[in-house]
Amino acid sequence: SRTPLTLLGTGDMGTALARAWLAAGHPVTVWNRTASRAEALAAEGATVARTAAEAVAANRLVVACLLDDASVGEALDGADLTGRDLVNLTTGTPGQGRARAAWAEARGARFLDGGIMAVPPMIGVPESGGYVFYSGSPELFAEHRDTLAVPAGTRYVGADPGFAALHDVALLSAMNGMFAGVMHAFALIRPEDIAPKDFAPLLFGWLTAMAPAVHQTADQLESGDYTKGVVSNLAMQAAGIPTFLRTAEEQHVSPELLTPYLELMEKRVAQGHGDEDGTGMIELLKKEGSH
Ligand code: NDP
């Protein structure tokens, strides 16, 4: 028989998770702050608990998928976590993951933090490639990995409960930068000049062709040699800055998404590192007191 579990939070993501577990034959107890949002799942076989405390009492394995870390604290305030295995799939910071782990352990629970690398339609669809980063209690993960693997792939990234969030937020941060570039590019082309539908496949191809550069960055960071294997040196790239800015101006587009990156590039070149590529710019992002 399949492991029964409790799911706190039946928003878009929580509902998708619940459906995947129900479809796989797991008994699921759900709770949602706004009860009406959990009712649809009752028709699909879920047990709806009236309070979070009641939902937590129903099963040893308790999964939370709420809006943010504060809502996890609010929802679980007053619930008895003794002997529970709490898996927190709520997006948060590494520090929040660590604090929530200590909080859960002080209440007698084992704790695993998770960072979901999927959108709701990818949940329960193995071929979508969606997965969840997990970090925290290795015992909890070992015991429940088959159950956790039902809605999405699993990647355990260490006992430090902050590491799931660190992986998650680092990937999402890179995504934000990529989308910033994408928005700027679409603004530049203007539909009256180039049809977005004609441009999109070119953009997709270019981003895909450039993506392997991340391996070069990792290689340079690990060797400490930022000039290793450079193909497009920073001095050459910086010489192109006026072209970026003037093109934006000619197309009546604000350069505000590009300028922070271009300014950092200029600064690194001014420090005498024109023979590197972008990796050395990471040095300029480090703040006092970082390791
Ligand atoms: P929704 O906005 O759809 O749902 C939010 C959930 O949090 C609801 O169940 C809501 O309850 C509950 N909630 C909010 N505040 C509180 C509170 N103070 N106390 C108790 N419950 C509260 O968000 P999602 O389901 O999409 O997201 C849930 C988590 O999953 C987030 O951390 C998100 O970052 C993460 N995630 C989402 C992805 C997505 O694409 N949707 C992708 C990857 C991660 P109520 O119905 O009562 O408002």
Image (cartoon, rainbow, N blue to C red):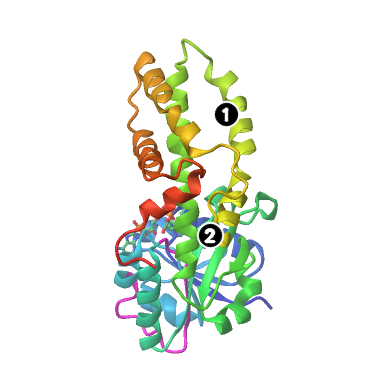
Amino acid at pointer 1: Leu
What residue is at 46 percent from the left and 89 percent from the top? Answer: 83
The quarter of the image holding the N terminus is: bottom right
Asked if residue 184 can be seen in this view, the reply is yes
Number of numbered markers: 2
Residue 84 lies within the magenta run: yes
- Mark 1 or mark 2, earlier in chain: 1
Q: Residue at x 57, y 29 (%)?
A: 203
**Mark 2 residue's CB less than 8 Å from ligand 1:** no
Of the numbered discs in the image, which one, if any, rests on residue 133? none
Return the residue at label 2.
224
Nearer the camera: disc 1 or disc 2: 2
Quadrant of the rendered image containing residue 225: bottom right
Q: Quadrant of the C terminus?
A: bottom left
Residue 32 spot, x, y in % from top left: 39, 63
| Residue at figure coordinates x 43%, y 21% from the top left | 188
Residue 130 sits above or below residue 164 on the image: above
Query: For the residue labelled by badge 2, is the local secondary structure a helix, a strand or a loop?
Result: loop
Q: For mark 1, what is the residue?
A: 203
Residues in magenta? 75-91
Give the percent coordinates (x, y) of residue 53.
Answer: 37, 78
105, 177: nearer the viewer: 177
